[in-house]
Image (tube, rainbow, N blue to C red):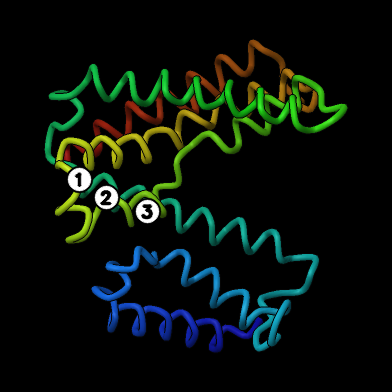
């Protein structure tokens, strides 16, 4: 792996985007978009300046990097929200996350089912579940900074931030339920309910809330 080259290009994109950050905001160009463009240019598809890993290990490295990025983005999102935001806006936040997420899941699944021939209902539900959650990395570019503060009221920005962070967790049991419906899972409905929904999702959310409140 060309580790030093990877560090160099990451540092380069941070410095360059930071130097012209206000100008980029006025053109609505986001940091994730710039990172994608730079990655395509220096990667094997264009100039082939860096090779991240052998082909057999690329997915494993990509998965680890994505997990780290999501963890940092979710932490940053949580820290941006005002204290006790959820308890003060429990009705709006709950409706936005739960029913909004379920509606996105069903609508996305319906679109996949209608436009892709021979796609089963189970596979349509799986694809719908995958695209349903809002990306907290991209959402942060819409809810933070002077442009967002100028044009978006704080109530809307905070609700968007909250929704983008919460629905990543809510998508987890939906994706696994879709796998079960599609016949692609190695677990049954009882295990999905106890292990995935109650233990890995709800219990983890409760523990995170307690730890966060304590901190």
Callout 3 environment at 10 Å: few (<14), some (14 to 19), or many (20+)? many
Q: Under tag 1, what secondary structure?
A: loop
Residue bearing mark 3: 73
Callout 1 environment at 10 Å: few (<14), some (14 to 19), or many (20+)? some
Q: Under tag 3, what secondary structure?
A: helix
Q: What label sits on residue 29 in the rendered view?
A: none
- The answer to whether 6 is drawn above or below residue 187 in the figure is below
Please state if 194 lies on the left or on the right of 87 as rendered: right
Q: Quadrant of the C terminus?
A: top left
Please state if 107 lies on the left or on the right of 77 as rendered: right
For the point 50% across and 20% down, the residue is 102
Residue 208: where, in percent of width, then height? 31, 35
First reached walking from the N terminus: tag 2 or tag 1: 2
Residue bearing mark 2: 143
Residue 7: where, in percent of width, then height? 49, 83
Q: What label sits on residue 152 in the rendered view?
A: 1
For the point 62% across and 30% down, the residue is 128
For the point 42% across and 18% down, the residue is 99
The residue sitting at the top extreme is 190
First reached walking from the N terminus: tag 2 or tag 3: 3
Alpha carbon separation for disc pair 2 and 1: 8 Å
Residue 136: where, in percent of width, then height? 39, 48
Q: Under tag 2, what secondary structure?
A: helix
Alpha carbon separation for disc pair 2 and 3: 13 Å
């Amino acid at each position: 792996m060309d580790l030093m080259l990877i560090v160099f290009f990451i540092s380069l994109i941070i410095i360059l985007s930071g130097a012209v950050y206000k100008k980029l905001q006025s053109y609505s160009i986001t940091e994730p978009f710039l990172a994608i463009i730079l990655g395509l240019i220096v990667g094997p598809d264009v100039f082939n300046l860096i090779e991240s890993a052998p082909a057999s290990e690329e997915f494993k490295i990509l998965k680890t990097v994505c997990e780290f990025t999501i963890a940092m983005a979710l932490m940053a999102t949580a820290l941006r929200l005002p204290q006790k935001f959820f308890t003060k806006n429990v009705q709006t936040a709950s409706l936005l996350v739960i029913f909004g997420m379920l509606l996105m899941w069903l609508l996305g699944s319906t679109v996949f089912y209608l436009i892709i021939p021979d796609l089963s209902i189970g596979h349509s539900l799986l694809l719908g579940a995958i695209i349903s959650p809002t990306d907290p990395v991209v959402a942060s570019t819409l809810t933070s900074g002077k442009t967002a503060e100028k044009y978006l009221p704080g109530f809307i920005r905070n609700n968007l931030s909250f929704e983008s962070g919460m629905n990543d967790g809510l998508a987890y049991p939906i994706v696994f339920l879709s796998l079960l419906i599609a016949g692609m899972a190695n677990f049954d409905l009882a295990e999905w309910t106890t292990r995935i929904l109650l233990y890995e999702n709800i219990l983890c959310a409760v523990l995170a809330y307690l730890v966060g409140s304590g901190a």
